[in-house]
Image (cartoon, rainbow, N blue to C red):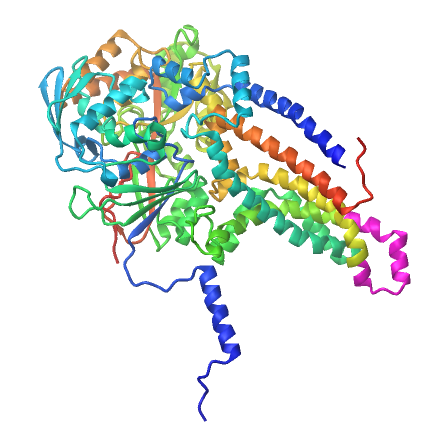
């Protein structure tokens, strides 16, 4: 296991090299000059040139790439052209917000998916299974921004249970509710699709396990059905679910853009969208690199969790 | 038998649970004071920097005009710029203006009095950094020097009648020299020290900016609000819902479809003024376009202008929240005339067809680009349908904003539909950049006659004479049609009932709350 993890860690620089090259190439292939966008149309060519020089955008592309990578290895991701703030400071400000949102979404997804997947498997081919399957497919089919608008209308505007905006803005010392309430609707909107994925996955996994010999033996021993399902079947069915959930969590952090936009959440997604629109090269590059590292680590954690949950699983070097 | 008043274990636990819940949930007792804060649901995205010596966008401008008092402020009703941080300005000779600053005006947070040194420092900073403001407002300024604690002398490179509007009105935001040198430009941009009615308090990047009342504001009794909060809500429909729900008190740019509902909403008040902006079609000219391309004939461009049913655009695209126009100078500017001046509101297809025939053009196809703004996409489709009736086929191309700007600003297009906000309050800004052969967005258009007219109007100091000159320029534009103007989109602002003392501006980036208060 340790050898496997070390090998995976050793692969990270190679993966990051590919990521940095791809991001750098994409940013520079896409048309649009960040300096021109920033300075607007009435500016002088001298002003454009001065700023371009300041951000080293006047240098040849290989040199720009080398400068960026060299600085990144020292933890310096440059400064935002539009925000006039170090990219690392922006990440430090915004990543916890996106993380909180994704964590909320995953908690919601697990809270619903666990009972739903289990019930659908135990009551397979009954109306309850069909209902849960139908709801899951619906959850998957409807995009999260539609869920967001629907949730706003029902729970914020009509019932007035939750606020629409204000996530991440509660001042220090605010009540727990003041800090959490604005995250509820965005987390649910973001988590609905994950709920459907995880519920379908758990159902399939449970169905496979429920046909195993040891389950039949447990029943034959006279154990109550709920004990068989909860203690024997669910425990094993959870292994792939946890792994998928860990990977999905990394993915969730990266797909918060639309939800952050709708609920005005100051997270990574909204900043990245802003940066793309304004061609804020240092922010696009820095954020993408950071997210890539985060995703790689999330995958690594998933692999580690897999072996911890099932000691029979080993990774060959 | 009487009820026991003793504290039982159950009551104690119940009380403790209720108290805990109240503290966790943040429930506080109701207070009987009048409302003293205002939460503004800000459109757009992260306002970015709040320093006037670094390029800022429209949403930042809204925040900044509550933090800073510029040298001058726009009085759109009188169509002129009036003194604010400056007490007065006067022309000493054709190349020299003397600016007198208001005495006793203080920078926030103990940074001392506003002096001419601050003005000199701010403008010199623009010159040294070659900032965008040199190109937009200060281009005619040769030098500035302090001639007393509260007076500065401005030397010009050329006579410049647009000085009050462009330099005082648009270039007139200053930084505190002491604070700016102490903090450095980047820190200042996120911790601004202003001289206006509200002081910067805190920022949550991308989401919220909090301002507090400036207790030392020079205008006695102002501001009335204790706190002004700007919360960024990019989605227009969500912005309206947040207002309806009372999470915010004031919004701009609601979704056009929400406006009729909002007008009937008893909790809200509605304000709508024609904006200082245009939706317009623009053409490229040689060297960016072939000289024999059909739209190089001005009769064809006139035909397009006649073919456009501007009233339909106003009704269908903006749900009535726009003002039909055919001129570059909107209401509120010097030189404005009642619209439309030449092209009928509902178009004139017969006239358009005659002009196409007169030009000897038998129909052609042209690529027309626009950005990803959904209203422009819909408007372009509508306009394409209109001009198809005179045999012109618009091949529509949509681009994301970055790619679109790249094409537009580098003249890599044949024809486009764009909307633009005019930020400075002088008619020079509405025409010079777009029509002068040296203008950044003339896109190849420019004639010696137009250049001369624009330069003369820019130099003339007498307001009456300038007005006449701008009328002549507009007449020329209506004849040549290098740009075709459709509508000025109204700025719709919605507020919770009870907001008083707020004067809606035709400028998108101007929403000052210095006199705002809650009544009732």
Percent across and percent down for residue B126 are: 28, 21
Q: Position of residue A162 (x, y in %)?
A: 49, 55
Q: Residue furthest left?
A: B92
Residue B360 image point, x, y percent: 41, 9
Tally of numbered discs:
0
Q: Is residue A107 left or right of residue A87?
A: right
Taking the view exactly as shown, the residue that stands out farthest to the bottom is B1
Magenta-drawn stretch, dominant element (helix, strand or loop): helix
In magenta segment, residue B75: no
Percent x, y for residue A244? 71, 42
Residue A41, compared with residue A216, is above or below; it is above
Quarter holding residue B141: top left
Residue A288: which quarter of the image?
A: top right
Q: Is residue B198 left or right of residue B372?
A: left
Q: Residue at x 58, y 39 (%)?
A: A253
Magenta residues span A203-229
The answer to whether any part of residue B478 appears in the image is no
Q: Residue at x 37, y 18 (%)?
A: B303
Residue in front for this viewpoint, A121 or B344: A121
Image quadrant in which the C terminus of chain A is located: top right
**Does residue B341 appear to the left or right of B403 in the view shown?**
left
Q: Is residue A218 highlighted in magenta?
A: yes
Which residue occupies 91% across, 62% down? A220
**Which of these two is toward me, B240 or B468?**
B240
Q: Quadrant of the N terminus of chain A?
A: top right
Q: In the rendered image, which quarter is residue B332 located in?
A: top left
In the rendered view, tell whether residue A19 sits above or below residue B322: above
Q: Is residue A26 visible?
A: yes
């Amino acid at each position: 296991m340790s050898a496997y993890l070390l090998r995976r860690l050793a692969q990270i620089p190679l993966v990051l090299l590919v990521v940095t090259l791809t991001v750098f190439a994409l940013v520079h292939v896409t048309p649009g000059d960040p300096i021109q966008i920033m300075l607007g149309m009435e500016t002088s060519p001298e002003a454009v040139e001065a700023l371009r020089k300041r951000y080293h955008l006047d240098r040849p592309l290989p040199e720009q790439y080398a400068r960026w990578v060299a600085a990144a290895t020292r933890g310096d991701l440059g400064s935002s052209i539009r925000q006039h703030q170090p990219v690392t400071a922006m990440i430090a400000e915004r990543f916890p917000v996106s993380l909180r949102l994704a964590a909320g979404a995953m908690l919601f997804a697990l809270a619903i998916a666990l009972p739903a997947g289990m019930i659908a498997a135990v009551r397979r081919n009954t109306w309850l299974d069909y209902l849960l399957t139908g709801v899951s497919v619906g959850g998957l089919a409807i995009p999260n921004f539609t869920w967001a608008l629907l949730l706003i209308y029902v729970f914020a505007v009509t019932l007035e249970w939750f606020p629409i905006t204000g996530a991440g803005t509660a001042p220090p010392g605010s009540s727990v509710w003041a800090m959490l309430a604005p995250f509820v609707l965005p987390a649910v909107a973001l988590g609905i699709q994950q709920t459907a994925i995880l519920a379908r996955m758990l159902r399939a996994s449970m169905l496979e396990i429920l046909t195993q010999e040891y389950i039949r033996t447990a029943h034959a021993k006279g154990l109550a059905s709920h004990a068989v399902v909860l203690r024997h079947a669910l425990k094993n069915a959870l292994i792939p679910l946890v792994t998928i959930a860990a990977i999905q969590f990394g993915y969730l952090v990266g797909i918060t853009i639309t939800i952050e936009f709708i609920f005005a959440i100051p997270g990574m997604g909204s900043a990245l969208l802003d940066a793309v629109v304004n061609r804020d090269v240092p922010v696009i590059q820095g954020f993408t690199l950071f997210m890539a590292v985060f995703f790689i680590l999330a995958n690594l954690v998933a692999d580690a969790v897999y072996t911890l949950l099932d000691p029979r699983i080993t990774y060959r070097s | 038998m009487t009820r026991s008043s003793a504290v039982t274990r159950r009551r104690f636990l119940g009380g403790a649970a209720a108290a805990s819940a109240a503290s966790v949930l943040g429930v506080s007792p109701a207070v009987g004071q009048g409302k003293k804060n205002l939460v503004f649901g800000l459109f757009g995205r992260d306002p970015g920097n709040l320093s006037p010596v670094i390029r800022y966008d429209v949403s930042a401008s809204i925040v900044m005009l509550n933090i800073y008092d510029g040298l001058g402020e726009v009085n759109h009703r009188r169509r002129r710029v009036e003194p604010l941080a400056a007490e007065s300005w006067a022309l000493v000779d054709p190349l020299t203006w003397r600016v007198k600053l208001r005495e006793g005006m203080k920078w926030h947070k103990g940074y001392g009095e506003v002096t001419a040194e601050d003005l000199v420092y701010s403008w010199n900073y623009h010159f040294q950094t070659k900032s965008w403001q040199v190109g937009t407002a200060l281009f005619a300024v040769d030098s500035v020097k302090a001639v007393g604690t509260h007076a500065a002398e401005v030397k010009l490179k050329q006579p410049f009648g647009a000085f009050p509007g462009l330099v005082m009105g648009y270039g007139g935001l200053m930084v505190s020299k002491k604070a700016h040198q102490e903090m450095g430009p980047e820190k200042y941009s996120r911790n601004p020290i202003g001289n206006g009615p509200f002081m910067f308090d805190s920022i949550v990047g991308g989401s919220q900016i909090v301002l507090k009342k400036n207790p030392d504001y020079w205008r006695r009794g102002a501001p009335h609000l204790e706190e002004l909060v700007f919360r960024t809500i990019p989605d227009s429909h969500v912005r309206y819902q947040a207002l309806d729900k009372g999470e915010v008190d004031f919004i701009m740019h609601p979704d056009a479809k929400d406006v009729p509902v909002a007008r009937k909403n008893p909790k809200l008040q509605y304000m709508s003024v024609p904006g200082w902006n245009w939706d317009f079609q623009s053409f490229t000219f040689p060297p960016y376009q072939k000289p024999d391309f059909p739209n190089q004939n001005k009769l064809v461009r006139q035909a397009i202008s006649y073919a456009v049913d501007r009233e339909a655009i106003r009704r269908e695209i903006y749900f009535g929240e726009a003002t039909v126009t055919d001129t570059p100078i909107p209401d509120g500017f010097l030189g404005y005339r009642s619209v439309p001046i030449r092209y009928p509101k509902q178009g004139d297809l017969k006239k358009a067809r005659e002009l196409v025939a007169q030009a000897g053009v038998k129909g052609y196809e042209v690529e027309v680009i626009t950005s990803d703004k959904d209203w422009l996409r819909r408007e372009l489709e509508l306009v394409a349908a209109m001009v198809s009736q005179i045999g012109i086929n618009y091949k529509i191309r949509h681009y994301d904003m970055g790619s679109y700007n790249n094409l537009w600003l580098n003249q890599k297009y044949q024809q486009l539909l764009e909307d633009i906000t005019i930020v400075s309050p002088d008619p020079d800004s509405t025409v010079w950049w777009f029509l002068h052969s040296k203008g950044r967005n003339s896109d190849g258009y420019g004639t010696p006659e137009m250049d001369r007219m624009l330069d003369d109007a820019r130099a003339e100091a007498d307001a009456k004479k300038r007005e006449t000159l701008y009328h002549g320029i507009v007449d020329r534009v209506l004849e040549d049609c290098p740009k075709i103007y459709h509508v000025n989109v109204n700025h719709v602002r919605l507020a919770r009932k009870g907001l008083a003392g707020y004067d809606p501006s035709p400028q998108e980036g101007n929403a000052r709350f210095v006199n705002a208060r809650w009544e009732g």
